[in-house]
């Protein structure tokens, strides 16, 4: 690599490290504060809070890196222009297309980092976060199962446990469930176990009875059912449980492209939704080179000025906003119709065309600013 390319690339990487650190810190702290409050309110330790915030870090980094690349190229180009280094490079015969080569290499490098994150680290972190959230929910459930006192885990639900054995069995359990206005069900059991399945914590009642009381015009009717074993879902009462389906974002890209029946059953999504998520990941790294090139190409059209290129910086920011707006619009459209997934690559194509047009404008020979014609005698 020529020395001038190494020099520009070193400048961009240094600035990129600074902007990435600042933006990730701000974004991460903003998300960690709300997570910190939620976990502490559930009685979790500082280690659990630290683990959860660390698992959200890959997602934060993947979102911030393209913005940091844009900021690094815009600031770096502005500094090269302000210190007259761009003037010297132009005088040495290096045009905008030639100077764009190290910027493009830098953008591809950032794009590879984003690809590693969105295809590998982010799905792994999200899957681990989902598993740990389920474990936390089960632990919170266990905290509510206290013996010797009536408890009210949900509206119109009463729970009583006489004692808890050393092996975890709940002895002499009573539950009154009046959530359904049409009936009130009372469960009693000699013992019960708390188990975990795909939908959350479940109580397995052993050797018990269910009494269903239904009001009627001729008076209330009572139905009694005895059972040897009965499962009672307590996930909907404790810690906001219920039917917990896996998220598409928890799976790898190759799995989403294949869309096997097991994945569709676990997530409740269609094959089109799975492929849409995969193509969103494939398109996301393409925006990093676009952001880097946009920050460079827009500033190159201004030429040298003692007042700097802040007007061009404003245009560069507007260009980045336009690309991001187009990306959001394409994602919304594909969200309505998964068959339109090629639209996800349109923002990258538009951004590449915009950068090429800006570099073409910057490379055009500039004539004198006068109205034309030679000097008058």
Image: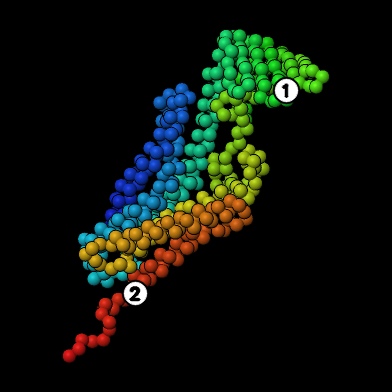
Tell me where residue 87 appears, x and y as whole percent: 24, 67
Per the model, the C-alpha gap separating discs 1 and 2 is 81 Å
Q: Nearer the viewer, residue 292 or 251?
A: 292
Q: How many discs appear? A: 2
Of circles 1 and 2, the one toward us is 1
Q: What residue does disc 2 label?
A: 364
Furthest-left residue in view? 377
Furthest-bottom residue in view? 377
Label 1, residues with CA under 10 Å away: few <14, some 14-19, many ≥20: some
Whether tag 1 and tag 2 are in contact, CB under 8 A, the answer is: no
Tell me where residue 326 appears, x and y as whole percent: 49, 58
Instruction: Identify the element where label 1 is drawn.
Output: loop
In what quadrant of the picture does the N terminus appear? Answer: bottom left
Q: Is residue 271 above or below residue 29?
A: below
Q: Identify the residue at image location x=45%, y=66%.
A: 353
Q: Nearer the viewer, residue 93 or 45?
A: 45
Q: Is residue 375 above or below residue 151?
A: below
The answer to whether any part of residue 228 appears in the image is: no
Position of 245 with respect to 122 (left or right) is: right
Q: Check residue 183 in the rendering and tell me which mark sits there, or answer none.
A: 1
Furthest-right residue in view? 218
Furthest-front residue in view? 217
Tell me where residue 350 appears, x and y as whole percent: 47, 63
Q: Identify the residue at image location x=61%, y=19%.
A: 194
The answer to whether any part of residue 52 appears in the image is: yes
């Amino acid at each position: 690599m020529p020395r001038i390319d190494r020099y520009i690339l070193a400048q961009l990487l240094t600035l990129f490290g600074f902007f990435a650190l600042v933006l990730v810190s701000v974004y991460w702290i903003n998300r960690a504060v709300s997570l910190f409050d939620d976990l502490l309110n559930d009685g979790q330790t500082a280690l659990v809070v630290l683990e959860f915030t660390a698992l959200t870090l890959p997602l934060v980094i993947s979102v911030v890196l393209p913005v940091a690349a844009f900021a690094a190229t815009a600031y770096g180009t502005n500094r090269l222009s302000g210190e007259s280094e761009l003037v010297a490079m132009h005088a040495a015969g290096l045009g905008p297309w030639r100077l764009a080569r190290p910027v493009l290499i830098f953008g591809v490098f950032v794009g590879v980092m984003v690809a590693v994150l969105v295809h590998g680290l982010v799905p792994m972190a999200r899957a681990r976060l989902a598993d740990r959230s389920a474990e936390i929910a089960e632990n919170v459930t266990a905290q509510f199962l206290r013996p010797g006192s009536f408890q009210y885990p949900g509206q119109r639900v009463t729970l009583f446990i006489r004692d808890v054995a050393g092996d975890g069995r709940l002895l002499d359990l009573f539950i009154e469930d009046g959530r359904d206005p049409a009936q009130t069900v009372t469960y009693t059991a000699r013992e019960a176990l708390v188990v975990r399945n795909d939908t959350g914590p479940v109580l397995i009642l052993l050797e018990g009875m269910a009494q269903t009381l239904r009001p009627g015009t001729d008076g209330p009717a009572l139905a009694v059912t005895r059972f040897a074993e009965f499962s009672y879902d307590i996930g909907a009462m404790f810690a906001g449980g219920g039917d917990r389906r896996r998220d598409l974002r928890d799976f790898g890209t190759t799995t989403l492209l294949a869309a096997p029946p097991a994945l569709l059953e676990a997530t409740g999504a269609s094959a089109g939704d799975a492929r849409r998520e995969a193509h969103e990941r494939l398109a996301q790294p393409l925006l990093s080179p676009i952001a880097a090139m946009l920050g460079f190409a827009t500033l190159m059209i201004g030429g040298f000025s003692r007042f700097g290129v802040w007007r061009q910086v404003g245009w560069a920011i507007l260009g980045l906003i336009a690309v991001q707006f187009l990306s959001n619009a394409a994602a919304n459209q594909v969200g309505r119709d998964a068959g339109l997934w090629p639209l996800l690559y349109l923002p990258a194509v538009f951004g590449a065309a915009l950068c090429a047009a800006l570099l073409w404008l910057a490379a055009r020979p500039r004539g004198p600013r006068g109205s034309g014609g030679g000097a008058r005698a």
